Image (cartoon, grey):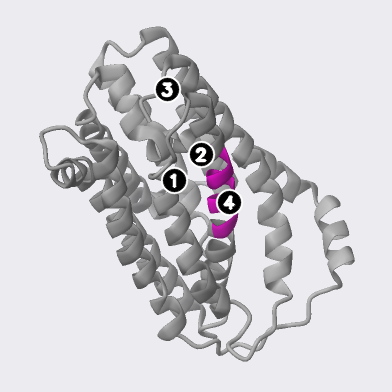
Amino acid sequence: MGLSTAGIAKATAILGAAKVWDAVTDVLLGLVVDRTRTRWGRFRPYILLTAAPIAALTVALFHLPPGSEDARLAWFGVLYVLWSMAYTLCDVPYWAMTNVVTTDDADRTRLIAWARTAGVLALAAVTLAGVPLARALSFGPVATEAGWGRLAIVASVVGMGLFTLAFFATTEEVQASTPPPLREGLALVTRNPGLLWLLASGVLGFGRFVLQVGGVVLALVVFGDEGFFTLLGAALIASMVVATLATPALLRRMTRKALMIGSSAVAAAVYLVQWFVGYAVLPAVIACVARPACCWACSWSLRRP
């Protein structure tokens, strides 16, 4: 988009506001999904029905109409909120399916582990190969907006095409229990302080995902070269792998809550150091990128049943 400094600030504000809205829609759409009943099951239909909208919205995010910076940012904001809602509608049923495709707890754990691993590998592939592929599709030495747009088309078609396998290659073996009425479900949510704190922490911690959402912009603004995104992304992926492998050993020595609090505290300390050091020292920037990823990977691993 070629954003100015003010434009980057506005884009950050848009992402923050979208994260707040996402916390609300996660709960509401989760209640809707839980009350879905079809011949194909409770969760599988959402896998199929959301694939095309997510692909289309992803492509649209990389093909904003021409206009002023504010106009394009407005388009981006609307599309990103719609994309986030569509993603929730596919992500919540996708992980909930692990509870209904098998009755064996060991199988569920293995299934989640394989799915998490595949997700990390896919993220690694996009992170490390994204800039080179965008340059190649720009047909020049520099990645252009058109090149990123072409890459978005390829990634969306391939990615969401593979995602539909979760519909065509599975069946829901476990019968769904009857949930409480929607109004009662909403009341239970508002009376659950633990869930409300969890949602609040997710909103306040959205900065952990800035690299994934705007890593190329960060590389351009800080270092003047989008190629640095590959280096930063490598640090992100490496830290995620290390944290995921280390989490089981850490959980044998401490509680889940203690691990989350401790890893979050260390991540906050690294951010604070980065504030004083600045961006002139590349190792410090890499450490800042890698440490929050460890915290995120630990929280990811803690979601296993």
Q: CA distance from mark 3 to mark 1?
A: 32 Å
Using the numbered discs, state the Cα–Cα distance from disc 4 to disc 3 in whole angstroms.
33 Å
Query: How crowded is the residue under tag 4: few (<14 C-alpha within 10 Å), some, or many (20+)?
Result: some
In-front residue for pair 191/2: 2
Q: Earlier in the sequence, mark 3 or mark 1?
A: 1
Real-space CA distance between mark 3 and mark 2, rounded to the nearest whole angstrom? 31 Å
Residue 277 within the segment the image draws in magenta: no
Q: CA distance from mark 1 to mark 4?
A: 10 Å
Badge 2 or badge 4: first in the primary sequence: 2
Residue wearing tag 1: 61
| Separation of marks 2 and 4 at Cα, in angstroms | 10 Å
Q: Where does label 3 land, which residue?
A: 270
Going from N to C along the chain, the mark reached first, 4 or 3, is 4
Q: Quadrant of residue 175?
A: bottom right
Query: From what the image shows, is residue 300 above or below residue 118?
Result: above
Query: Label 2: which residue?
Result: 76
Give left or right: position of 280 versus 208: left
Question: Which residue was labeled with disc 4?
Answer: 82
Q: Position of residue 238 (x, y in %)?
A: 26, 43
How far apart in space, not on screen, are marks 1 and 2 (Cα)? 6 Å
Q: Which residues are magenta?
A: 77-86
Q: Is residue 253 visible?
A: no
The amino acid on which the numbered mark 2 sits, given as a three-letter code, is Phe
**Horizontal side of residue 183 vs 292, given as left or right:** right
Image x and y of residue 296, in percent: 46, 43
Label 3 CA crowd tier, 10 Å (few <14, some 14–19, many 20+): some
Secondary structure, magenta segment, majority class: helix
Name which of mark 1 and mark 4 comes first in the sequence: 1
Q: Give the secondary structure at mark 2.
A: helix
Residue at (63, 80) in percent of width and height = 42
